[in-house]
Image (tube, rainbow, N blue to C red):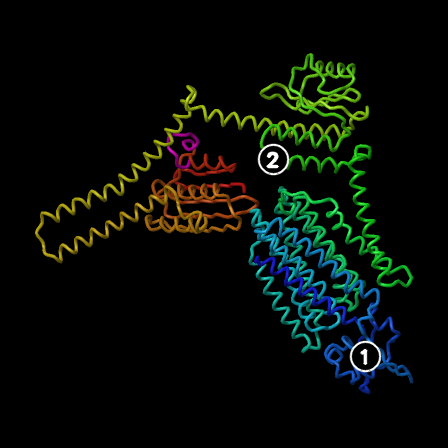
Amino acid sequence: MNRTVIAMIVALIVALYLTILNVRHPLIGIDVVENKNGDIIVNDIYEFGWAKKHGIHINDQVLKVDGKPPLSHFTVRKYKTIEQAKTITIQRENQIQTLTVDYKSHGTEQWLYYIALPAGFFLFAVSLSIFLLRLRPDDKSATVLIYFLLLIGLCYISASLSAKYALFGRQMFNGIFLILPAVFLHFVHHYFEKEKKLWFTNKIIFSLYGFNFVMFVVSLMSLSFRSISEAEVLLTTFFINMVIILALLGKGLVYLKKDEQQNTVKGLFFAIGLSVVPFILFYSLPVLIIGKWVLPAELTVTSLFVLPSVFLYLICTDRLFQLQFSINHFVYYAFLSLLPSFLVTLLYIKFVNEARGLVELALLFLLIYVINILALYLKGCFDRILRTKLYVQKDFYQESIYRIGEALKKQKNMQEVIQCLEKEVSELLAIEELAFVQPAIKNMQAPFQCDEKEWMKLTKKMDRKPLSIGKIIENKRLFAVFVGSFRQGPLLLIGKKKHPIPFTAEQTDWLSTIVYYTSITIENMAKVEDLIKELDNLKESRNSIWLTRLIFQWSEKERRKLSIDLHDTILQDLIVLKRKVESLRVQNMRMDEMKKQLSDIEEEIVDIIDLTREICHELRPPFLSQIGLKEAIVQLIQRFQLRANIKIEWNVHLLAKLEEEQELAIYRIIQELLNNALKHSQASHIQLTLEVQNEEVQLHYIDNGIGIDMKKLNHYDGKLGLFGIKERVQGLGGTCEMTSQLGEGLDIRITIPL
């Protein structure tokens, strides 16, 4: 069975057990203090506790807890509070009263805050986890996100038991509460590592795990110290974790400022911010600074519902995981309605002074929940029907431009591109008919039924005005847009509006923009198709002479280079070995002398094998994809230092994962630079730096050799060398700056965008 499924089953069992414990033990909410006479006195009454609802007052004396002296009860002895008790005997003045605490003692607020809300949140988190597991079963980042959602659900449920000082629930809450930030950061690292857009290392994550574990141990030991409390340790640690996470997400916004994934970081920033800021501002910081909260934790933690809601939104809008699915609108609206329904019910309980039973509150919640779902569903329907009659919103069209831009990238042919444009125009404008035509402008027939006079006026306007891509021509209810000229002739988008209302300026700009995007996409598709056909037909065409010559020239150059290397190295060594073997035949020598010469020959054969292996590595490094670019460069430098008496100072610092083409290009560039230094530069010292900064790979090479004539470098002389390096870098969209003077060495700076 899948480990994630096992984790979900275990989480469900633990959540059920914790919920049962919550039902069995109401929150009593009595803080006590021991006076000078050794009496246990009520010091504080918690707002949502059982004690406040049952008439217990501050300064009441506690005589017995569960029929025994108060100090014999473990929560009184350890935490100076009364929890998990069955009976409490109170004395006020001369009156003594024994009160019974059982599961029926839960007040309405306790059922809501300590049972209904945590259980509802956990079920929400489990539902989202199942949803993710079905769609991304083998994705590591999705798996970590599932663990995060399950843990935060268990944390919410165990928080209720922690408030009641139940040992199992309290320790579970402390551990999960401290580990959650690190797990969230782990998810962010996995997700952006998969996208190859990572801006922080996993050392930060493991450091956070270690720090939080240490603080968890400190929280366990806090009872031994009088100067610090367990709550202070937990809240301080949590605050530090949040500062680190928000700082890293802020850095991610800057790092991905020109990338589509910035929207994902914004969503994560928004989710973390809205879910924890109320808890930090109104509970955590006030407790740490002034020792008292502004709002109780029960209220502030309800903002946790924002977290899975935002994750669901990011998933459904393809901003978190690129998922090819369609979610049922009803299910989506049901998810979104949970949080506002809980909040409205909560506000009703808080501000409406009417006694209500649990069943009535449950029915009230269900009524509000259904109304929310219906409201969202009707809003979606009205948006589709009335969106063109409402006031135009700038952001509405900007989102459409982004949406169609993403959609066009996924299309495979011209027909799919046209359908994509047609769908977008139909959804955003009040269009009755829409068609694409490719006839001549003169004598053009209407592609759909319309008023003939109105159609004639539209065609006359098109005759008079020069056609340009994105140009919109209107005539009452008809309009035409020139998409572009392609193989079959001009492509026109002809439409019939539902109402004779001219397009607004924003609608015109939007339509022109998406038509222009579509035109570029179709044109690029046509060029790619033409190029592929041309390459397929070049072998049988007379015009293929230039391509054939080019292929053979490059092939012959590589063969010539390999031939020279083999001739100057392996072949010469083999000739020498052959002569030594021939001399052994004709010479009469003792056995020990013959063994010595054979041993020398064997060593030379080993050297030839090593040289052959090195030449093979230079032709194609087989280990590049296995051990990584950094280690491959290290081995390249080590082999170079064995052949050359040149000192190299090098620093290779690569955090981002590069594409295979980029890795091979950088390896070849460094290889060529070192070969150039060995053969031509006469250098005694080389500095080489390779790092990733500002979303680009930066390579810096300096030597103290004889330098080169830059005028000759800028002209191709039939050899590769440094000119070939410039061509290779430019082919990857990068820049190559070379500065040198005769006698003053060589300085090369190369940047390649990621």
Position in image of residue 3 (x %, y %) = 57, 59
Does residue 654 appear to the left or right of 142 in the view shown? left
Q: Quadrant of the C terminus?
A: top right
- Is the residue 298 above or below the residue 45 in the image? above
Q: Residue 649 carries which label?
A: none
Does residue 250 appear to the left or right of 350 in the view shown? left
Q: Element at badge 1?
A: strand
Residue range highlighted in magenta: 711-722
Position in image of residue 307 (x %, y %) = 71, 54
Q: In which quarter of the image is the N terminus?
A: bottom right
Q: Residue furthest left?
A: 588
Position in image of residue 244 (x %, y %) = 65, 58
Position in image of residue 254 (x %, y %) = 64, 47
- Is the residue 65 above or below the residue 182 in the image? below
What type is the residue that disc 2 sits on? Lys
Q: Which of marks 1 and 2 is nearer the N terminus?
A: 1
Q: Residue 409 carries which label?
A: 2
Which sits in the foreground, 641 or 209?
Answer: 209
What residue would you read off at disc 1?
87
What type is the residue that disc 1 sits on? Thr
Which sits in the foreground, 347 or 426?
Answer: 426
Q: Residue furthest bottom?
A: 37
Q: Residue at x 83, y 84 (%)?
A: 63
The 10 Å Cα crowd at callout 1, few under 14, some 14 to 19, many 20 or more, is some
The magenta stretch spans residue 511 = no
Alpha carbon distance from label 1 to label 2: 69 Å
